[in-house]
Image (cartoon, grey):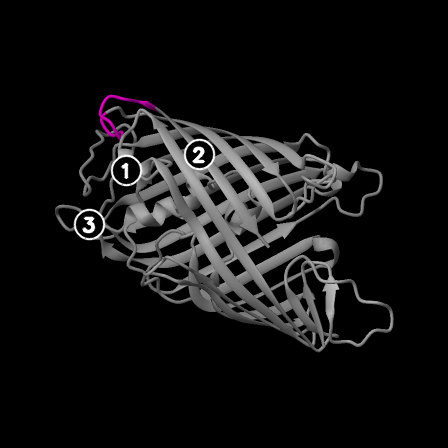
Amino acid sequence: MRLTLPGAATAAPGAPAAQLQGRWSPRPRITSGKNFSLELRAKIQNDGAWFNPVVDPEDEGFTWRRRRLAVRGEFFNRVEFEVEREFGDDIEPWRDAWVNVKVHDLLEARGGKFKLPFGLDNSTSSVEHDFIFRSLGTRALAPGRDIGAMIYGEAARRRFTYAIGVFDADDRLVADSERFFDDDQGADSFGRTVSGRVTVQPFDGVASLPSGLRNLEFGASGAWSEVAEGLNSFKGNSVFGYDYFERVWVNGDRVRTGVDVALVSGPASLKAEWINASDERLGQGVDDGDLSNMFTRGWYVSGSWLVTGEDKEDTVSPKRPLLQGGFGAIEVAARYERMLLGSSADASEPAFNNPRADNLRRNQDAVVTVGLSWYLNRWLKVQGNAIRESFDDLTRTPLDGTATYWSYVTRLQLAF
């Protein structure tokens, strides 16, 4: 039996198996060869926010974004489980609770509560993200966590990955503002949801190409569910949850699709993603007739660069950590994105804001985010983002007649 904890003395060769060792690998971990392992994980994030102009003074200041502890275990390199709790959340405290069985690299099965497979931005952990918040399209459209079952797998060197699952109804009673402000909540689902994602790296293994191109990855995602009759459509929320497109009456199928591309080379990365959702509006006209589908569409392009020269990986480890002979690692990033809502009716017809109108009056939010991240060591990170957003329709903005808004956000993160 072996216990691995930070700050312990290094084991001498030939010492008994049960002892403390001087390494964090990279988190507290108990192991017994290949038979059993148990480790503790944590995500702690505190955010600060300031605005110009100020819409609601209560939104300014500091708040706990995530305070999560998780236990993950593994048996015989085949069976894995995780239980994660969010402290301070009385509505949905248990985030992940699943069991995973590995049959082969190409076939694993997972059951329980976990995030649905959908999208590049949505699949990236909040502690590994280039920005403090995920993109508008991901926050509004990508499905979050639900109870269900999934099969997934990957080929050698992740040249191909796939995941598909079936999930239960989303019965969370979370206010719109809280759901959107916590960008890990995910979008609404109703009834049973089928969701899946595939990725390919077509140039992996082509030795004549630069390493960056060999890492080029394309992804595609899709999700289907039924949307309950009522004012249950997607809605337009600004970065901090202010409405610029109200919910409309819907009924029928909800179909979400997305494509993405990512290129990582050395200290730099480039990413782009497009997500579209279509809600049927069967029998929702004032005469009980069918209306044209409502659509919600978001896309972004982003890039990042570790100016201190570290390789861009899921977990950035500074070459020279703070207080260990260096300053840590510095990364700069930028993202441009848009989110548009409307209906698929003939654009030449008059458009209205009425939630039962066939041709819904469109509105769009355009956002530019510039970010700076300081990795003090592999566990501590400080981030700062400046966010500029502007709206097309001046009558549907957080402050009537004001099109442009600035947000300044900070984050202090401890994660292991």
Q: Which residues are magenta?
A: 395-404
Chain-order first, disc 1 or disc 3: 1
Residue 294 figure quarter: top left
Q: Is residue 146 above or below residue 35?
A: above
Badge 2 marks a residue whose secondary structure is strand
Q: Residues within 10 Å of mark 2 (few under 14, many from 20)?
A: many
Compared to residue 52, the image places residue 203 above or below, namely below
Q: Residues within 10 Å of mark 3 (few under 14, many from 20)?
A: many
Residue that carries the numbered disc 1 in the rendered image = 58
Q: Name the residue type under label 2.
A: Val
Q: Which residue is mark 3?
A: 284
Prevailing SS of the magenta stretch: loop
Q: Is residue 206 visible?
A: yes
Q: Is residue 344 visible?
A: no
Q: Is residue 246 above or below residue 280?
A: above
What residue type is disc 1 on? Glu
For the C terminus, the quadrant is bottom right
Closer-to-camera residue (321/100): 321
- Is 344 above or below relative to 148? above
Report which residue position mark 2 lands on.
409
Distance between the alpha carbons at the discs numbered 3 and 2:
40 Å
